Image (cartoon, rainbow, N blue to C red):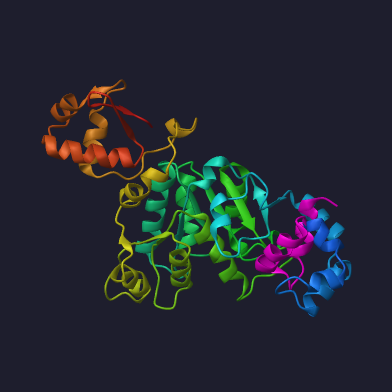
Amino acid sequence: MNATEACIALNMLPTVGPVRLRKLLEVFKEPQQILAAKRTELRKVEGIGSEVADQISNWESTVDLSAELKRVRDFGATVITQESPSYPRSLHEIHAPPIVLYVWGELQERDHHAIGIIGARRTTHYGTESAKKLSYQLAYAGLTVISGLARGIDTAAHQGALAAKGRTIAVIGAGLARLYPPENAALAEKIRSGNGAVVSEFSMEIEPDRQTFPMRNRIISGWSHGILVVEAGFNSGALITAAQALEQGRSVYAVPGHINAPSAMGSNRLIQQGAKLVMDASDILEDLQILLPETKPSPEAAARPLPPLSDEERRIYDAIEATETSIDDIAAKSELPSAAVSSTLLQLELKRLVKQLPGKYFVKLG
């Protein structure tokens, strides 16, 4: 048995969990050693009582590891542990990082730079379109969009990132073999087939329930540099995720909604309480730009449409030639005041559409 297989077995034991595993590893060092330990040795570890020690020492009567490994192989998934290079670095910072992550698709280095987009399942047209627009812009700029594959805002967030030919990760509150909601199976397939991955900390056959979704949400917030709440009522689970994000030291952003709309009461209250108001992706990118790596446009970038632009942004973008263009030439061609040109070029830089070169020259990136 290797370390990954041992972690899968430990993850399938109901009484273990990430916090107890951390304490066990402090003593036994390797996950295989935990499973091989005697009951008396296990009980000496802080927080490991008789019930937990009994379950670990008799783990083979609870866990059918060979069957689980076969399910993973047959599904075409992989399993990573906290020691894996592709395990999200930011998850190491949270209180209870997942023992394992089941991954359907592929994780990339750039997925360490992520933004979570969440909101209501029952959403308005305004909320859906806002989520798609902002997700498109953020994915276009190079951030990986993380959401939960749920109906409503989550679905729109994944769709926006895919439309931008960007990266998106769906973190689900069930096992991969119990994908939820079932109507998003085609979306999940599209995500995993080259644009990201569907990820779960639960063993393959676990059904979704009231406990699995809050556990899923801590991964979304913990993985992300920040959380964007697009539309949420007073009782929306998105508000719980936003609170978790704050506890984890992440930034919280919110899209304003109509003051009389029940679907926006929670997100509006977040803004009232200090969340940054977001009307455009540049509001987030300006906050996070020091965290983002320098990225070159992907091979697909030339074929994808531009994200939504204002009239001024479009005029200035069109004024930049195929080669580097001076700010004076941009101002002359766009017929806009110099102050407007400078501020708009900054917005285009934040959206990763243009880059400033020495001598106040600019070049297109897309």
Residue 6 percent across, percent down from the top left: 80, 57
Looking at the image, the residue that sits furthest to the top is 323
- Residue 322: image quadrant is top left
Which residue does the image show at 81% across and 55% down from the upper left?
A: 69
- Residue 298 in view in this figure: yes
Q: Is 18 covered by the magenta stretch?
A: yes
Above-or-below relation of 166 to 210: above
Q: Is 256 covered by the magenta stretch?
A: no
Which residue does the image show at 73% across and 70% down from the upper left?
A: 16
Above-or-below relation of 210 to 324: below
Which residue does the image show at 32% across and 47% down from the upper left?
A: 286
Range drawn in magenta: 1-30
Residue 235 percent across, percent down from the top left: 44, 78
Q: Count the marks.
A: 0
| Residue nearest the viewer, comparing 261 with 5 | 5
Residue 15 percent across, percent down from the top left: 74, 73
- Residue 242: image quadrant is bottom left
The kind of secondary structure the magenta stretch mainly shows is helix
24 sits to left or right of 56: left
| Residue nearest the viewer, comparing 270 with 157 | 270
Which residue does the image show at 70% across and 74% down from the upper left?
A: 47
Above-or-below relation of 35 to 311: below
44 sits to left or right of 121: right
Residue 88 percent across, percent down from the top left: 58, 50
